[in-house]
Image (tube, helix red, strand yellow):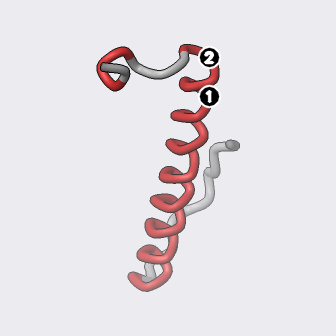
Amino acid sequence: MPLHHTPLPRDIDELTRMVLALEAENAELRVHSDLLKLFVFGPRSEKLG
């Protein structure tokens, strides 16, 4: 993900949309990360018993 060096918009609605979009992207990345951990390391031992 490239870093953007453009100034942030001053419009509150636009900033809110940007934050919500980043939160959604972050949630999706967490799901992918959790799946990769499961594939690499297998199920957690606490959940086996």
Residue most extreme to the right? 2
Per the rendering, the mark at residue 5 is none
Residue 18: give x, y in percent of width and height.
51, 69
Front one among 49 and 40: 49
Give SS at disc 2. helix
Residue ID at (45%, 74%): 15
Proximity of marks 1 and 2: CB atoms separated by less than 8 Å: yes
Three-letter code, disc 2: Val
Q: Quarter holding the C terminus?
A: top left
Front one among 17 and 33: 33
Is 2 situated above or below 48?
below
State the image quarter where residue 10 is shown.
bottom left
- Please give left or right for residue 6 compared with residue 13 in the image: right
- The residue where tag 1 is placed is 36
Residue 26: give x, y in percent of width and height.
50, 50
Front one among 26 and 7: 26
- The residue where tag 2 is placed is 40
Residue ID at (62%, 16%): 40
Three-letter code, disc 1: Leu
